[in-house]
Amino acid sequence: MNKKLVLSVLSTAVVASMAASAMAKPDAGFYVGGQVDKYYNIDAFFNHFDEALDEIVDNLDSTTYVDADGNAASFQDILTANGDLSKVMKPASLDHFEKNPYAIVDGTGSYNPEEDEDLLPVDEGELKVESVSAIHLAQFVIKFGAPVDKASATDPASYKFDGAALNGTIVLSSDKKTATVTLATPVTNNTYHTVEVLDSTIKADGSITDYVPAKTEAVLFNDTTKPEVKDSVYSPDGEIYKLTFSEPVKTLGTINVYDENNQVVATQNDFTLASDKLSATLDTSASGINLAANKTYRVVMVGAKDLADNFFANNRVEKTFKKEKTDTVAPNVVSVTVVNSTTVRVAFNEAVQVDATTGKVADITVDGGTTTDLKVVDTTPTAVGEAIEVTPGTVFDVRVSNTPLTGAHTISINNFKDLQGNAVTTPVVKNFQVNADTTPANLTKTEAANKVVTLTFDEDVTLGTSPSATLVTPDNVEIAVGSAAFQTVTTNSKQIKVDLSSVVTTPVVGNYQLKIASGSIQDTAATPNTKDYTATFALTADTTKPTVTAVTVQGTYGNDVVVVAYSEDMGASALDVNNYLVDGQKVFESAVFSSNKQTVKLTLKPGVFDITGDRVLTIENVADLAGNKIDKYTGTAETYNENVKPVITKAELLGLDKIVLTFSESVDNVDDTDFEVYTDGASTPQAITVAPQGTSDSVYEITLSTAITDLSKEVTLKVLSSNDIVDKPAGNKLATSGKVSVEQ
């Protein structure tokens, strides 16, 4: 942005301030944020004109102008409005300012917006679904009363459509209060459809405990509105002509493109309808078309329809375009300002191209290092070059270092283009100064849910070497909290979680204090800043019913075990086998917690099922630690294997060198490693071989390596505990073990 334009806007602002009718707070003037943090009243601005002008130019996106009537606007908004203050000035509120004091130039002290009672608070609104309405047959919008969390609001699992899973994509508006849902399949015109926002799915923005209440709306999709052409643009970049529509179109009908001699030079067959059906493009340089430069062309479209078969007005669209390059000026970098010790804000003087696939905007090099892509990402940037798009196409917050910076630095920005394809191929080099951060992060919010406390700070934070705290209960009992309880939050670098579940078993209802020792939580400055923190929060009585989250029938523990998983820690009633029935029968002999108090391992009575088949488990009268009982659980039919264990029913001598074993049923995995045989009074076992008798899988012969010579001595057969003999096909392990009598 050149200084002449900025000066023009500044002069308008100054004149407006002088002409204002009355004084109001906050005081009139310029509040420059970023790394400057200064307040200039009108006199101070003129006294330090050059310095103030440079600071404002370098921090356009973080400078706020306040007039003498107490109305405010960001300088970037004023520039966007071409200096028309009436379009952007509003009563000053807290969100016009940064959350830090502004040093008063030519005065004493500082101005802290958060301490100014005259500022209007940020209107958070009510957390609810305000309305659901159809836009067209493939799109509807959900308006929320307050900002919502982007991840949960754009997750199709947070919604249902006509009682089934939502099949579509969701985009959340920049103010996080409107979700636009595009269905994968359009609906039929003039029909009602049910839209559900599911309970406990969409969080309030920045919250872990507050959810949008469930809401169900019957929405009429009735499209009688004629579609329109929103834009007709020729782009020299790629020589593309583009028609943009107000809603998706089903068909383009007939399109003729006429030259200046009224000759048809292209038709609908040369246009490409976008996948979202919201635009159609013509490659004017394509083979067989190749429209001449600097000529005017007329486009006529007839018979085009939207998804509801509505024609365009009068069933005719006529547009003209000239194949010429109207903008030949390359874009420029307006400013580079510091956001924090790892991030700078890059502002361009006009919209630049963002690659639709990769998100790439430009190449950047920091301090002469490795060149990397400046690319837009949807999540918090974690790598150098990753950026958040603050203002579409023009302002980007770019991560420039993975470690905190201090002092003077340079950033080189190259290879970017404006929307008409004017390219910058010579690096634009900007300097930026990162002043040493000596202020610890401030704790701005404390939330508690399920014994986990989430702490939110006003800047990025991390954990110290050995974090610790003292928890003070409502009855003034102090409990030590060790480092294992502290966790960083991967999705929000301004949050720390403290899991108190190991120190608070059954919460006492009331207010708690968490006194966190200095050094436990620190900011990300080059020299980390830290201090003591005290977080106050309430734990209320648990009134939430537990639920069964999973049932594993005869899994890794074998055919005698069923494992039940609950949504939270359970009480002693979860170990009462009388609370678990299969087909209405008491079939379990014992129950124990496994690994934690959310998982119960149930052991079936021996041989309770003598046939494999589908059975249903029911659970009731089971409660959590607070005494909340589950609603009766009835599972789906699952296959329970018979659990009758095989046994050896007979062992008899056959001749002097064989023992015949008879099992109670068909078995598998029978071999010589499962047994030991002692004969003739020997203390060491004989070598043996084991094989089925004929084709039988329930009768096996053990052949001795040496025939018996003294039948007066006992023939001893031992079934080793290490045997892996199981029945077929259920796989129940052999019940017989130890010494078995051999009939002679």
Image (tube, rainbow, N blue to C red):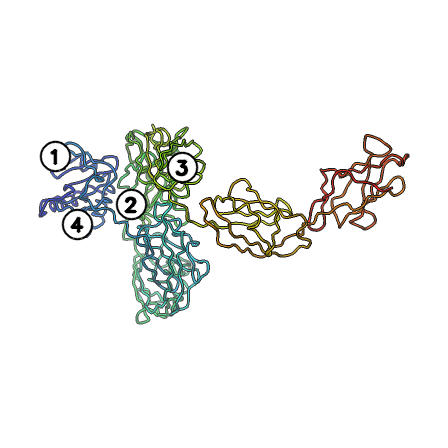
Looking at the rendered structure, which numbered label has been put on residue 577?
none
Real-space Cα distance between discs 2 and 3? 48 Å
Q: What is the three-letter code of the residue carrying label 2?
A: Pro
Q: What is the three-letter code of the residue carrying label 1?
A: Asn
Q: Nearer the viewer, residue 413 or 634?
A: 634
In what element is the residue under mark 3?
strand
Sequence order check, earlier mark of 4 and 2: 4
Looking at the rendered structure, which numbered label has been put on residue 47?
1
Question: In the image, residue 425 lies at what x, y percent?
Answer: 34, 41
Instruction: Mark 1: give few (<14), some (14-19) or many (20+) Cα within 10 Å.
Output: some
Q: Is residue 466 above or below residue 413?
A: above
Real-space Cα distance between discs 4 and 2? 26 Å
The residue at 82%/34% (across/down) is 678
Q: Is residue 107 above or below residue 195?
A: above
Question: Left or right: where does residue 541 sit relative to residue 319?
Answer: right
Report which residue position mark 3 lands on. 498
- Marks 2 and 3 close (CB-CB < 8 Å): no
Report which residue position mark 4 lands on. 85
Looking at the rendered structure, which numbered label has been put on residue 331?
2
Sequence order check, earlier mark of 3 and 1: 1
Q: Nearer the viewer, residue 337 or 33?
A: 33
Question: Left or right: where does residue 615 sit relative to residue 27?
Answer: right
Question: In the image, residue 270 lies at what x, y percent?
Answer: 40, 62
In what element is the residue under mark 2?
loop
